[in-house]
Image (cartoon, helix red, strand yellow):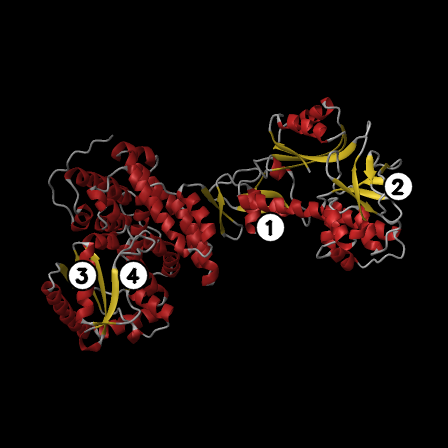
Amino acid sequence: MVSVASAPDAVVAPDLEAALAGLDPAERALVLRAHAFAAPLYADRRLGTGEPAIEHALGVAASLAALRLDGATRAAGLLFAVPEYAGNAGERLEAQFGAGVATLVAGVWKLNRLRVVTRGLAAQGAKEADRQPQAEVLRKRLLAMVEDIRVVLIRLASRTRTLRFLARAPDESRVPVARETLDIYAPLANRLGVWQLKWELEDLSFRFLEPALYKRIAQMLDERRAEREGFIAQAIDALARALAAAGVRAEVSGRPKHIYSIYSKMQAKGLDFGELHDVRALRVLVDEVKDCYAALGVVHDLWQPIPKEFDDYISRPKANDYRSLHTAVVGPDGRALEVQIRTHEMHRHAELGVAAHWRYKEGRSARGDPFDEKIAWLRQVLAWRDEVVDAADWVEQSKRAALDQTVYVLTPQGRVIDLPRGATPIDFAYALHTDLGHRCRGAKVDGVMVPLDTVLENGQRVDIVAAKAGGPSRDWLTQPRYLASSRARHKVRQWFNAEELARTVAAGRQVVEREIQRERGARANLEELARGLGFDKPDDLFAAVGREEVGTRALQIALRGPQEPEAPAEAVVAKKSKAGGGGGILFVGVDRLMTQLARCCKPVPPDPIIGFVTRGRGISVHRRDCASLGHLLARQPERMIEAQWGARGDQVYPVEIAVQAHDRQGLLRDVSEVLSKERINVTAVNTLTRNHVANMAFTVEVADLDHLKRALAQIGEVGGVMSARRR
């Protein structure tokens, strides 16, 4: 901790005295020492705008004093340019003024490095609709780069001072500076509730960008100034007497209207200057919230309210916690008058925003608990959500920005792209365009080729090297170092899902076309075939066939169309079938017919089963809950034949099982060992890993369901296995 002795009594220059207003002796001494340190260092140096550095520093400190910020913040405002003019600035500042002031100065200097990007956005001359999304990203980046809200307030005060200087000394650079201010800094001041700076930033920027229109509105205000001042004085007197008569303690004053806000309201509502209700305005300050509503009643008793011009921001505060009652009435002489009513505490917040919140919250000073300050800071950042079109996306983005979990990188054209911390060039490519992400094969960062798993940092310029065609690598999903953004992972998964579906559809198409060729003279209209089997279009049918959800028997029956069964189902004694793959199955009324187990449902004893009489290929045996069988019986219910399991001997049956597990080395080996110990033959295996989760499909041969259940139970005990079930 650096101890600061009180400064000796001395005559202080007026410009410095403004920076010292309201400080206790220790803080006053700190600011004086900061000035003594900076003044000789700045000497005759000038900033890029031509303004003397020492004058700018004093102006910044005075603006911070007007916001009632603490001595450390004002000292940092005076020392803002020390890193540029002094070597080893960080250590010198910490030694002279303590770590707190040094950190603030470093934060301000870091924000100054954004000028190249923010000024470049203004100079590009892009359309408003194209520029605003980039401005939003830059505002978030500015916030993400700081950990102390006071750094942003120093930057806002510095920009206000720059505009004041440019108003005195016109320069060709003031147009891009003004555009940058309206894009970045004025909205930032608005969201943080720093109204004193916000209004001045807007008015000066508007003056530089639209000088003729600014002058026209200013003249309209000036032409009516004397008349308006007389009207306001009359209204103040009338309202003050009415409030006193009603027993409401209140301060009533006239409220100046800012030129840019007048212009914005004219633009937003399509109104002419004479149609605005709030060019003439009063402000009423009371002690308590209940007095606000009492004062509102007095106003509406005194003057006639204008319909649809009342807003209650006390019961429903704005996103930045602004609270007040707004009403418009027909005032003296029949002219419109706006009246704002609020408590003194609400007024302090409205005028000073974040600074007031710190100063007056629970009666504590601005130097309260740092955690409380951080919470207040986060609340203000989240209040930006009403400026963003995609609210769902902003919830995620604002949390990341507020917690410094976002990095901002540049395209070769200077666009700013925000990405989650830990993002790689592949994340960057997908943020630009999905197709570019798929074709990404390399990247240059600041002109140097880097691996695709390189972690990007703030301010880097990234250029993607892409192939003419192709898709992503599976390593991007299986190796976590390649992708940090959920959007990029989702796009990669979508690509592989689409590729897998295409393969399944192609395989199913081959099966369907083969069956069409086998059934000579069969109906081959694919649209009709798909609808006949319950699908909307052929591709859906192909996918179902490729996944073996529809068997070849169902295809054959659908291709042949409805026909009479070859043999009637007469009630005779059940006899055992002697041939085919369905040995051990008893049918009612049919003997010595070829049988086969349906591939679509693969029944296993003791599954409830039923037979379906095919044409020329015997009986197909299905589980009673088989979906494919349901389609067949809906068309030809007369082909159903009752069936049950008979003596099976050493018969085994094919069945499919699905295993889901956390992927690891040796997982497939461990599952296979369980099947081997259970003497279960595996005829096919298919595995697919996504997001470190392995999905394994086995086709096995078992004697009955008890055999299968024992195997599934043991597989479930293998390390990492989440589920094991029959498909």
**Kind of residue at disc 1:** Thr
Residue 266 percent location from the top left of the image? 34, 70
Q: Residue beneath label 1, please? A: 434
The image shows residue 355 at horizontal and vertical percentages of 26, 48
Q: Earlier in the sequence, mark 1 or mark 3?
A: 3
Q: Which residue is mark 3?
A: 294
Q: Which image quadrant: the N terminus?
A: top left
Q: Find out whether the residues at labels 4 and 2 contact each other: C-beta distance under 8 Å.
A: no
Q: Quadrant of residue 34?
A: top left
Q: Which numbered disc covers residue 425? A: none
Q: CA distance from mark 1 to mark 4?
A: 46 Å
Query: Residue 461's spot in the image, x, y percent?
Result: 51, 46
Circle 2 sits in a helix, a strand or a loop, which is it? loop
Q: Secondary structure at mark 3?
A: helix
**1 or 4: mark nearer the eye:** 1
Where 474 falls versus 432 (above or below)?
above
SS for callout 1:
helix
Q: Which mark is residue 593?
A: 2
